[in-house]
Image (cartoon, rainbow, N blue to C red):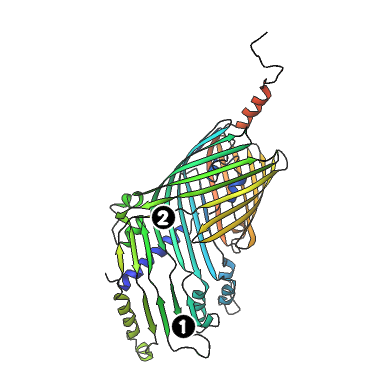
Amino acid sequence: MRVTMKEIKYFALIVFLFWNTTSALAQSDMIGYGLYKTLPQANNLNPALLPDYKFSLGLPGLSGFHINTGQNFTNLELLTAVDENGNINTGDIFRKMRRNNRVTSNNTINLFHLGIRGLTSYTAFSINTKTFARASLPKELFALALYGNASDELDDGLVDLSRGSVKTMAYTEIGISHGREILAGKMTAGIRLKYMIGHAYADIPTIDGSLQTYGNSEFRGDSISLNVNQFEIRGGGAAGALMNGDDIGDDIRSAVTGNSGFGLDIGATYEFSQKIRFFASLNDLGFINWNQGNSYLGTVPSMSYTFGGADVVELINGEDLSVIDELDSVVNNLEYNETKESFTTSLTGKLYAGASYQFSRRQTASAILYSELYKGALIPALTAMYNFQGGTFFNFAFSATMMNGRVNNFGTGITLNLIPFQVVLATNDLLSIVNPMNGRAVDFRFGINHTFGNVNKGKSRAKKNSKNTIDTIDLGID
């Protein structure tokens, strides 16, 4: 079929709206590791982390949410700063940018949580809705927009489009986990099985193309050329239905619930000594299958277009520019292939690994490595954390995280048990809260849980009342 300029604009609007909807929402939850003994939802980070509460319950609307979005190239202070003439200082903004500028976002809404703790085990059932968004923007695009097509910022006038991409996804996971102490309590192992329900998916992978502008050398050309090799666009669920032009108003349920998959989280902790403990977890090993009814697979064919300039007379007279008609003709003649086929997407796998040292009964220091693999690139973060725990009543954590090559992410969090309610407040980026103008991220967790009992009291009582010694065990003989 042939695609029109109107359809391209419509598709671009869908992707833009969906990305910006998810990018205002929730990523790595380092501070949750520091609060795991009193934060029931920390079990989602590692099924081998066993909270101290005998019973915990999180209800819809109260259980809470975690919002995280960030980028690696600017901040609000730069974006709003002006020079003596009242103009935005675009030069400073551009100089702070990277060769590949990323916007990342994840959001988690805790719909339900039920946890039951025994002396040596913990079983939990949870329902969480998550959104995910990633966008990569090459620096050359900003150079072209800010300085024009003859800028010294462009290498011989070439704008490489291959580093640009957008991917978004929304889904709900229903999971059941079980963790248990083994090796006489020196080690815990846990596993979580998850059933996934896909709601929406949109993906524009790397575009194999380039824009050759006039350039800034003495051998500059006399035209601008666009060259794009064939690439694919995928959509599923509600996003796929919109890309197909379907009216999902009457059948929204099938669009956002007819896609399913499975996931797995595994984790372990090991007590090396009374003071040193190691821990690790692999999360989101799984997939979602997007059904054929609401799927969209579009193939954009290879194309080339050369722009030699516009007729100034037409522009002055307010006439329709002939170059616009020429471009419309090129786009309309593209053999744009669209199909409906089911496809499978993998979740974004995450690794947490670290060690902790217990200074005293209430104080612990930890080092945690987080790593995420996205489009062949490893995105790491390293966190140092301090934790002070006053039983199950009060728990406090403070962290410093190195991400994107700098240590500027400071986090903190508390849990406060006001029987039978527990209040949770936490952030992995304190700067975004106290000084949002200089922050590069927004990260915030809030929730209220119902918590009861302290398993450590039972353990202490059992140890105190234990009579299993060689002198007191009744062997049943005289």
Q: Is residue 220 above or below residue 411?
A: below
Q: Is residue 121 left or right of residue 199?
A: right
Q: Which badge, 2 or 1, is on the more N-terminal residue?
A: 1
Query: In the picture, residue 465 is in which quadrant?
Result: top right
Gap between marks 2 and 1, in whole Å?
37 Å
In this picture, is 225 found above or below 120? Answer: below
Answer above or below: position of 313 versus 191.
below
User: Badge 1: how crowded within 10 Å, few (<14), some, or many (20+)?
Assistant: many
Q: Residue at x 44, y 89 (%)?
A: 222
At 49% across and 88% down in the image, what residue appears? 220
- Residue 32 in the image: x percent, y percent? 58, 47
Where residue 261 appears, as percent x and y from the top left, is: 40, 48
Give residue 217's position: percent from left, percent from top.
Answer: 53, 88
**Mark closer to the observer (2, 1):** 2
| Secondary structure of residue under mark 1 | loop
Question: Label 2 amino acid?
Answer: Thr
**Looking at the image, which is closer to me, 52 or 432?**
52
Which residue is most to the front?
477
Q: Are marks 2 and 1 in contact (CB under 8 Å)?
A: no
Q: Which quadrant: the N terminus?
A: bottom left
Asked which quadrant contains residue 246, the reply is bottom left
Q: Which residue is mark 2?
A: 345
The relative height of residue 221 versus residue 239 in the rendered view (above or below) is below
Q: Pointer 1: what residue?
A: 213
Q: Which kind of residue does numbered mark 1 sit on?
A: Thr
